[in-house]
Image (spheres, helix red, strand yellow):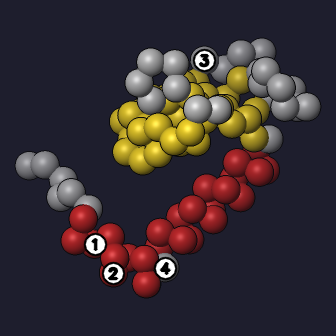
Amino acid sequence: MCTNVTSVVEIGGSGLGTSGWFPLERAVVYFDHPQDAAVDHALCIDLRGAGLARVAVELDAPSARRLVETVLAALGSEEVRELIEDRTPSPGP
């Protein structure tokens, strides 16, 4: 069963591909049948740059949850919050 749950978000950063590093422009996140991962369904993340530049990730649900929790913990640590507070854009009106 396909979920058709897909989100696209603009991002900034860099990805490492077969030709070296490239700037990332957007992420496409969806939960569906994976192309390669040995599970029935996976959280699939495509980190995309200009043209065909792409880094793809397929994670089983428990791994995806652990990754999200780990990212949020890292960004929520006091030391990191101090570094990014001044760089976080304020919400619009």
Residue type at the position of mark 1? Glu
Circle 1 crowding by C-alpha within 10 Å: few under 14, some 14–19, many from 20: few
Viewer-nearest residue: 69 or 54: 54
Residue type at the position of mark 3? Asn
First reached walking from the N terminus: tag 4 or tag 1: 4
The residue singled out by tag 1 in the image is 85
- Kindly give the residue lying farthest to the right in the view shown: 38
Residue at x-position 77% and y-position 15%: 1
First reached walking from the N terminus: tag 4 or tag 2: 4
The residue singled out by tag 3 in the image is 4
The residue singled out by tag 2 in the image is 82
**Residue 47 picture location, percent across and down:** 53, 34
The residue singled out by tag 4 in the image is 77
State how far apart marks 2 and 1 are (Cα): 6 Å
Discs 4/3, front: 4
Residue at x-position 24% and y-position 65%: 87
Residue at x-position 70% and y-position 48%: 64
- Answer with left or right where residue 9 lies relative to residue 74: left
Q: Residue 26 sits in which quadrant?
A: top left
